Amino acid sequence: MRVRAALTAAALLSLLPVLTAAPALAVADGADVAPGQFGFTAKLTMASIPRPDGSTYTSFCTGSLVAPQWILTTGHCFHDAQRNRVSGPVPYPTTVTLGLVDESKEQGVTRTGTQVLQSAENDVALLQLDSAVPGITPLTVNRLAPATGQRLTLAGWGSKTPKNPVPSSKLQQGTVQISTVGSTTVGVRGVAPAATTSACVYDSGAPYFIPAGSGGQLVSVETTGPDCPHTTAETTSRVDVIADWIADRTK
């Protein structure tokens, strides 16, 4: 899983001098996304997530706009205290921000998640927003089977490292290549900017897509993988196998 509890406020404060001098954190060994691109990539901020002992924490995921009022992300971003995936009203407050690449310079569009629908086929969920998002082109859900060797773009708001991870304030991207194709998943490996380009903590649900104009074709979403950065295969969930399910619920 690519979701973890956020750092405590005290821990974050202790890191501020380091973070001020370091490059923006995001997809491991990725590159900055140019202004105006990939506005469909959503940052999910989730508060008061329950633990078995009754305490709560804050965490983050990434997702993508696939319809004016719907975000596609990974299913395990929404769970109960025992980490069982849940459907229905959002289990904890979830804020969705999209339409920007740099939080220090842009405001973007903010919405609140209201309802979660879990796929029965793979680790994918749909998150309904409290209102439609205007002016941002959603990704089109791919209906063709992915192929080994196919290259995809990854965009995410995740951390650069699994050690003391923090969510990104700057959207990052990378190019990956499909290495394996399963019945509901595809394995991908980094290509550019480096062979170690890979998803990291808080990239759960990040889109892997073929860019086209202001949108593109969504092929899969981030599920899980080794500690980042790495050169081994990352597991992502195919969307072509659930394309009808997505279309039926986002009409």
Image (cartoon, rainbow, N blue to C red):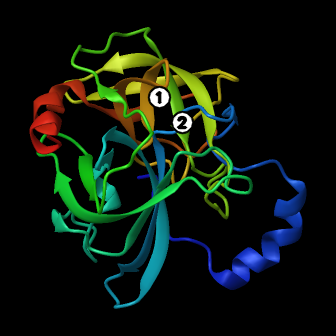
Q: Would you say residue 230 is visible in this rendering?
A: no
The secondary element bearing badge 2 is classed as strand
Q: Is residue 67 visible?
A: yes
199 sits to left or right of 68? right
- Given the current orientation, which residue lies at the most extreme bottom position? 54
- Locate residue 124, reporting x and y percent: 26, 45
Horizontal and vertical percent position of residue 189? 52, 24
Which residue is nearer to you in this view: 209 or 54?
209
Residue 67 occupies quadrant? top left
Residue of label 2: 155
Q: Residues within 10 Å of mark 2 (few under 14, many from 20)?
A: many
Q: Residue at x 67, y 55 (%)?
A: 103
Question: Which three-letter amino acid code belongs to the residue tagged 1?
Answer: Ala
The amino acid marked with disc number 2 is Ala
Q: Nearer the viewer, mark 1 or mark 2?
A: 2
Question: 197 and 60: which one is in front?
Answer: 60
Give the residue displayed 35% in from the left and 81% down from the top: 51
In the current view of this chain or complex, which residue is farthest to the front? 134
Q: Residue at label 1?
A: 233
**Residue 203 percent across, percent down from the top left:** 50, 48
| x 37%, y 42%: residue | 65
Relative vertical location of residue 51 with respect to residue 87 in this rendering, above or below: below
- Position of 193 compared to 138: left or right? right
Of 159 and 115, which appears nearest the observer?
Answer: 115
Q: Position of residue 111 (x, y in %)?
A: 40, 61
Seen in the picture, residue 18 relative to 221 is either above or below; the reply is: below
How many marks the image carries: the answer is 2
Image quadrant in which you'd find residue 238? top left
Quadrant for the C terminus in the image: top left
Label 1 crowd (10 A; few <14 / some 14-19 / many >=20): many
- Rounded to the nearest angstrom, the CA distance separating label 1 from label 2 is 17 Å
